[in-house]
Image: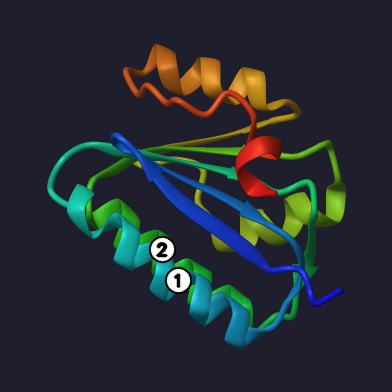
Amino acid sequence: MGMQAKFKIWREQQVLLAAVNGSWDRNTAEEYAAEFRRLAAPLVGTDWAHIVYLDQWQLGVPEIEPVIRELVRWCIDSKMRYAAQIYCPHMVKKYQLERMIIDHTDVFERRVYPTQEEAFQWLTAKGFQMETSSFRQKAS
């Protein structure tokens, strides 16, 4: 069997969804950032949200951090208002994600949830509807 894709990104209404896998190097982070920007382009200028499934992600080399920090800056500048991250509690993962992604600004908020149901409920309550009810079906 071939190598599993390191990420899958798709868009539903005003939400960009992603599932990420494996350990990342800078090249993977740059490919992800490029695909993310391409799919988010139609949303720029309107309020939008992001939800990412991180249980299968196994961290990245330090060189991914500036790439992801720059992507986060671009997202917030492009009116992304909410980001939900889904993963079981994991201290090292939490540490690396916090080094790359700010929790909130005056116009942006990030939250971490252990289950996709809670993350979807939060974004729905913020006014962002999605057809996806399960990452597992979409991400496979």
**x 45%, y 71%: residue:** 33
Secondary structure type for disc 2: helix
**x 71%, y 38%: residue:** 136
**Location of residue 120 with respect to 21 vertically, above or below:** above
Q: Which mark is residue 118?
A: none
The image quadrant that residue 20 belongs to is bottom right
Measuring from the top left, give residue 57's x and y in whole percent: 76, 58
Q: Tell me if 119 is positioned left or right of 1 in this view.
A: left
Q: Which residue is mark 2?
A: 36
Q: Which residue is mark 1?
A: 33
**Location of residue 48 with respect to 54 vertically, above or below:** above
Q: CA distance from mark 1 to mark 2?
A: 5 Å
Q: Residues within 10 Å of mark 1 (few under 14, many from 20)?
A: some
**x 50%, y 81%: residue:** 30
Measuring from the top left, give residue 67's x and y in whole percent: 50, 77
**x 80%, y 77%: residue:** 2
Q: Amino acid at mark 1?
A: Ala
Which residue sits furthest front?
1
**Location of residue 116 with respect to 87 vertically, above or below:** above
The image quadrant that residue 70 belongs to is bottom left
* Res. 108 in view: no
Q: Quadrant of the N terminus?
A: bottom right
Q: Nearer the viewer, residue 55 or 74?
A: 55
Q: Amino acid at mark 2?
A: Phe
Is mark 1 in CB contact (under 8 Å) with mark 2?
yes
Q: Residues within 10 Å of mark 2 (few under 14, many from 20)?
A: many
Q: Tell me if 35 is positioned left or right of 56 in this view.
A: left
Measuring from the top left, give residue 65's x and y in whole percent: 59, 74
Secondary structure type for disc 1: helix
